[in-house]
Image (tube, helix red, strand yellow):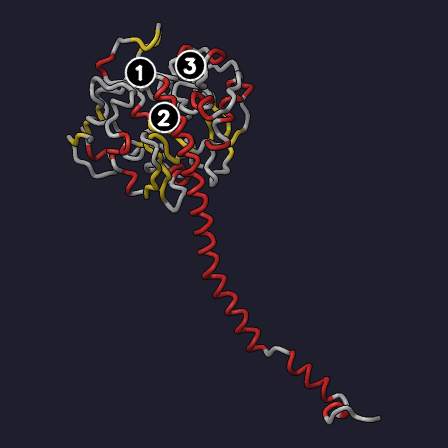
Amino acid sequence: MQCLSKDSCRGGSLGGSLRTADAFTLIEVLITVAIVALLTSVLVPVMNSARGLAQQIQCQSNQRNIALAMRMYIDSFNGYLPGSPNTSGAGPRKILPETVVATNAFDYASPLLGFLNTSVPANRADRQELTRLGVFKCPTNDHRSEPWTGYQSIPDAADFTTSQASSYLTCWNFLLAGDGYAGAQVTSGVYYWLYGATWTEVLPRDFLPKITKIGLPSRKVFLADAARYVDEGGQFTYDIGYSLFGAGGYSGSGAWWIDSREYGQYSPAADYSYRHDDGIAAVFYDGHCEYLSREQSYRAEYWYPKGTVITDGSEGAGGEPSGYVVP
């Protein structure tokens, strides 16, 4: 046999040499594993942060679309705000769900469906379901919610089933009326729902839920991330009542009040509300969006109309003193 090269005639030494070159030592394997683990520990938080930022951007895009519809509503209804029991919610206060758009007294969302080029179902439960989906759903909110009747007899209660939990709440401090309207009627048989004159925060006596009454729209929150009706065990429920009970299923008290069920010391709802890197996405009445950290969100200015007097600053999380007048 003629050897093609000196090395090819060494009786298998070439194969042995190749096997030695291909093998990894234990030290090399351990080093590789350590490098992979290090890269994973660096990249996973970066990827999670990027995903969280993308979800926040989508959330704010949703809110801007809702805000556009809100502005069209205001323009169409002589400056009145949607979601008030004194405006779009006056109908449900008459307990006539089959003839009104709003599903309950504080429902800001159903009256906006038409402005979002969405058909408005006649069935109240179907309307409410639409206000949990599409632009009304935060991409980080996958919680399910159970219907709750409150203290009312609800004839159409069987229409409501387990549903997507609500993602966004409007602030009810802009939706009530000052006590100067005590005894006045919104429509025949429906009296103005007043902000309590003896509460910790006192609205101007002539306040009405109108865009011209709230103060600077760019400093007043229309809508924000929030979890509504979450019990201590983490179970979400939604109010299917027609009329006034608490703030309904569509509004909350805002983040200034320390006893806020959505943002204050109430756990775990507050943790669900501050869902974007321990902050919230909020859209203001002028239509612009802001990210507010938990601490930033405590400012009374965001959640109360201009001229509101804070009579007891200890009730708030924002540090405003007693007697503070909201700008």
Q: Residue at x 17, y 30 (%)?
A: 325
Residue at disc 2, secondary structure: helix
Q: Quick one: label 1, few (<14), some, or many (20+) residues within 10 Å?
A: many
Image quadrant of residue 110? top left
Mark 3 residue crowding within 10 angstroms, few (<14) / some (14–19) / many (20+): many
The number of numbered discs placed on residues in the rendered structure image is 3
Determine which residue is flagged by label 3.
92
Please rate how many residues cluster around mark 2, counting C-alpha atoms within 10 Å: few if below 14, some from 14 to 19, many from 20: many
Q: In this view, does 155 lie above or below 64?
A: above
The residue wearing badge 2 is 71
Tell me which amino acid carries mark 3.
Pro
- Expressed as whole percent of the image width and height from the top left, the position of residue 142 reads 50, 38
At label 1, the amino acid type is Trp
Q: Which of 72 and 192 is in front in this view?
A: 72
How far apart in space, not on screen, are marks 2 and 1 (Cα)?
A: 23 Å
Q: Nearer the viewer, mark 2 or mark 1?
A: 2
- The local secondary structure at tag 1 comes to loop
| Mark 3 / mark 2, whichever is N-terminal | 2
In front of the other: 43 or 183: 43
Q: Distance between the residues labelled 3 and 2?
A: 22 Å
Q: Is residue 285 left or right of residue 327?
A: right
Q: What residue type is labelled 2?
A: Arg
User: Which residue corresponds to the image point at 71% horizontal and 85% vertical from the top-left?
Assistant: 16
Image coords of residue 67 (percent x, y): 38, 30
Task: Determine which quarter of the picture holds residue 206.
Answer: top left
Tell me the quarter of the image containing the C terminus.
Answer: top left
The residue that mark 1 highlights is: 193
Q: Determine whether, in the image, residue 5 is placed left or right of residue 54.
A: right
